[in-house]
Image (cartoon, rainbow, N blue to C red):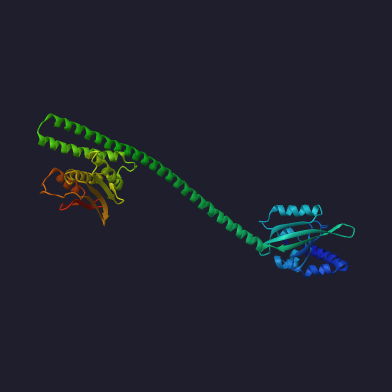
Amino acid sequence: MRPDPILADTLQSRAEERVSAFQRGGGPFVAAVEATRMPMVVTDPTVTGNPIVYVNQSFIDLFGYSHEEVMGQNYFFLTGPDTDPEVERLIRAAMIVDEPLNLEVQLRAKSGREVWVAQFVSPVHDNQGCLIQHFASFWDITRRVRAERRTQRLNEVLESRVRERTHELQKELDRRHALEGVLTESIREKDKLLSQRRVLLHEVNHRAKNSIAMAISMLRLQIARQGDPNVSEALENAIQRLDHLARIHELLYRQDSNDVQSVDMAAYLTELCRNFGHLQSPDDLRIELMSDADDITLDVDRAINVALITGEAITNALKHAFPDKRRGAVRVGLHHEGEDVLLSIEDNGVGITGPRRPGSMGMRLIEGMARSLNGTLTIEGDRRTRIAVRFPAAIRS
C-alpha cells in the first residue's frame, strides 16, 4: 500500500526541519551523510511505526525505490520472505531499550533482487537526552555472502563426494579384508595339507626302505638254502641293487628340506657317494668317491633315476675298474649344458678290458633309467670308463 501523500509531506517537512536543525547545530554531519556512498536512513521513533523521515541518495541507489516510496515507510518493508523473522525482533528490542544494534540481514530491492547488508542502528538524543531519531546505515555485503554461499555449496558438494568416495573405499576395504581372510584361510589349509603330504611322503619312503630291507633278508635266506654258485651270485647282485635302492629312499626320507617333491642334487649326490663307502673295507679305503654338481633341483622321480644310474655305475667301477688293490678315484658330475643336464660317472681305472657283455643286468638298468629321463646314453672305456647321460633340464610333456 502506498503511503498517504499528506502524511508523507508532513513527515518530510518534519524531517527537513530536523535536518536543518542538524545542519545549524553541526552542519558538516548532514552534508557528509548526503555525500557518502554508504546507504543511510533516519527514522522518527516519536511517531507510531517509527517511519523513515530521511534517506540519502546511496540508499535510493541500492534498493531502487524513489524518495516518495521510501518516506513514511518503516524500513522493515525491505524484508522479504527469506528474511529471518528474528532480525525484526532484535531490531525492535534494541530500539525499545534504546541501544545500538549491529547485525547482518537479508533484504529485498524493489526489483526483487536479494540484498545482504551489514546493518547498524544507533539511537540519537537531543540536548536533554531524549530519544528523537534512529540512525541506520547499511553496508552492502551481497558479493561476500554470495561468495560464502558458493564456497559453502562447493564444500557441501565436496563433502558429499568425499562421503561417497569414503563409503566406496570402505566397501572396497571390507571386500579386501574379506578376501584376505579367505586367502589367509586358504594358505593355512594349504600349509596344513602340505604338512600332511610331507609326513605321508616321508612315511612312504620309510616304508619303501623297510620293504626293500625285508626283501633283502628273504633273498639272503634263499642264498643260504641253495648251493648253486651262479644262482648265489645272481641273488647277491640283486641284493646289492636292492640295498642301493633302499639307501636312495633312506636319503629321501632323511632330507631336511620341507619340499619333498624336489631334491637338491648337489647335496644328494654328495651323500650318495658317502654312503657307497659301505662297499669297501674300512681297512682298504683305496678308492676315492667324489661328486661335483651344479645347483640343480630335480623332482623325486628323476632324482631316483639319476641315483640308480649313479649307483649302478659306481658299483661296477668298484668291482671291476681297480683290480689287484689298485688305487684310484670315481668322480660323479652333474652339470648344466645349455637346456640339458649332463650326468657323468668316470673312473681312472683299467677301463673296459674285455668285450662288453650285451644285455647284462647292470647295463639294462642303466639304459632303462636313461630312457626314463628322456636322455641319451654314451659309454667310453678305452683307458678309463665314462658313463654319461644327457637329458633335458625341463620335464617334457
Q: Quadrant of the N terminus?
A: bottom right
Q: How many marks?
A: 0
348 lies above or below 281: below
Give the answer, above or below, for where 39 lies relative to 230: below
Relative horizontal placement of residue 150, taking residue 314 as reference (left or right): right
- Pinpoint residue 108: horizontal percent, then vertical percent: 68, 61
Q: At x 14% / y 30%, what residue is drawn?
A: 224
Q: Nearer the viewer, residue 273 or 91?
A: 273
Examine the rendered structure and indicate whether residue 238 appears above or below residue 46.
above
Visible residue check, residue 40: yes
- Residue placed most toward the observer, 394 or 122: 394
- Taking depth in this image into account, of 242 and 50 the one nearest to the observer is 242
* Residue 167 horizontal/vertical position (percent): 50, 49
Tell me if I can see residue 113 in this picture: no
Where does the image place residue 337, in percent across and percent down from the top left?
26, 56
- Which residue is rendered at x = 40% and y = 44% of the image? 183
Which residue of the protein is positioned furthest toward the top in this rendering? 225
Q: Which quarter of the picture shows residue 282?
A: top left
Name, please, the residue furthest toward the right: 128
**Residue visible at 66% across and 62% down in the picture:** 144
Residue 283 x, y percent position in the rendering? 24, 39
